[in-house]
Image (cartoon, helix red, strand yellow):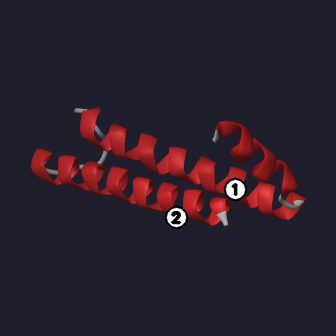
Amino acid sequence: MLNTSIQNFKKKSLKERFLFVIGMLVFIAYFILGLIFIFWKSMPIAMEPIYRISFGVLLIVYSFVRFFRIFNLNNE
């Protein structure tokens, strides 16, 4: 399965591969931003801890939604 994924990736145009890489970078950025909101206790933004953790979880969930959308578009 991994071998076919690599072959499918190589068959994509340069534009499609570039958009895939950008999409993965945005996924990683949202995921890391969510972790920052959850674990950074002394943030410069004044938020209650429950709202800060909720927002971090929301960002992580959104990053996975983006990841699965990119993954499904890549398989087509």
Q: Report the disc number at residue 20.
A: 1
- Name the residue nearer the viewer: 22 or 13: 13
Q: Residue at x 63, y 41 (%)?
A: 1
Q: Position of residue 16 (x, y in %)?
A: 79, 62
**Residue appearing at x 77%, y 50% in the figure:** 9
Q: Quadrant of residue 35?
A: top left
Q: Residue at x 70, y 56 (%)?
A: 20
- Measured in 3D between alpha carbons, the distance from the residue under mark 1 to the one under mark 2, in whole angstroms, is 11 Å
Query: What residue do we see at 29% from left, 49% from top?
Result: 56
Q: Quadrant of residue 19?
A: bottom right
In the picture, measured across the screen, residue 72 lies left or right of residue 75, that is left
- Determine which residue is flagged by label 2: 69
Q: Amino acid at mark 1?
A: Phe
Residue 65 screen position, x and y as percent: 42, 61
Task: From this view, report whether residue 42 is shown above or below residue 24.
Answer: above
Q: Is residue 49 left or right of residue 59?
A: left
Name the amino acid, label 2. Arg
